Image (cartoon, grey):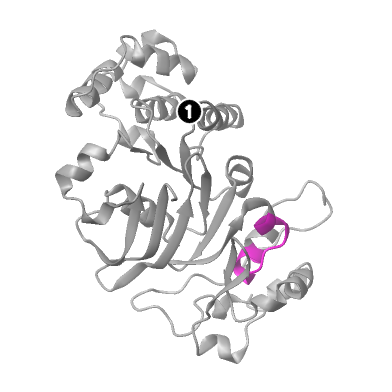
Amino acid sequence: MSLLDIRGLSVSYGATQAVRAASLRLEAGGSLGLVGESGSGKTTLALALLGLLPANAHVGAGTIAFDGADLLRLSPSEFRRRRWIDLAYVPQGAMNALDPVRDLDHQFDTTLRAHRRAVAAGRAADLFARVGLEERWLRHFPHEFSGGMRQRAAIALAMLFAPRLLVADEPTTGLDVVVQRQVLDLLGEARRDRGMALVLVSHDLAVVSELCEHLAVLYAGEIVESGRTGEVLRSPAHPYAMGLRRAITDLRQPDRSVISIAGAPPALNPPPPGCAFAARCPFALPACRRAAPPLATLREGRQARCHRAGEAAALWAAAQDDAVWNHGA
């Protein structure tokens, strides 16, 4: 049985369908990256599995099973008891997540008392040491920390009860490369030493490729491709994933240019007919604009939502031509 099993999850904000029929699985100790443009549904999906969706969000269908229990059937109080103990969250922008008028020692103590849990004396200091912060910083306020220090403090706080699953939303955004390295090492160490599973929300394919064994590509609220990270990045099967791959620098091919995907994601109130990516896709056929593509299984563990998934190798070869991506410019 998988630690996390999401099936057919749909989330909307009023008439806007932010996540549509998403299905994902994650084993205990595994790692999954969620990538896609801003507005693709990554953070909404992450917040749904943590029970932290805003009041105007509505879960229309689906299940989120964690260790066999459907989280969507828990009462708010039951979900609150499990959150932080079994599932923890590192939000994007730690300054907004930490209490600005309390020092970090107080915030650790408040979290312990909220869950009526006893942990070993010195636990907060030990966690601070693990993230590269001296114990004295526990007596400081968030505004006295640098951006990287706040991010590391938020990670330490999230790991207070050694959760089985950590959801990290853009944990390296806005950090310099040295601090990024420290944060990535910290998350990797937590997985290796504690057997913690990780869901990583990120725009950075390089970060995801380093930390995550599996990858899910979201576009317009749908998971359009998923599989082992190395396979998806080496030979993407969905044209949107191909565009993302061509939009990053490849050090092995320094002379290859970086492209951008023309156009913008569609409005989702309601979603367009057919494939949501069709208007921006250089390989779209007339049928792509009429009928929603099925989710094709390419091989075990690898799926793509595309009418032309069976032609993926030929399309990826064609995608190496920069001119292909100028069709909508």
Quadrant of residue 64 in the image? bottom left
Query: Residue at (35%, 26%) from the top-left corner?
Result: 157
Q: Which residues are magenta?
A: 231-243
Give the x, y percent position of residue 255. 84, 54
Name the quarter where the C terminus is drawn.
bottom right
Give the x, y percent position of residue 91. 37, 40
- Magenta region's main secondary structure? helix
Residue wearing tag 1: 194
Where 154 falls versus 165 (above or below)? above
Give the x, y percent position of residue 3. 42, 46
Q: Is residue 235 visible?
A: yes
The amino acid marked with disc number 1 is Arg
Of 143 and 65, nearer the camera is 65
Of 45 and 203, nearer the camera is 45
Q: Viewed as shown, does residue 238 lie left or right of 65?
A: right
- Element assignment for label 1: helix
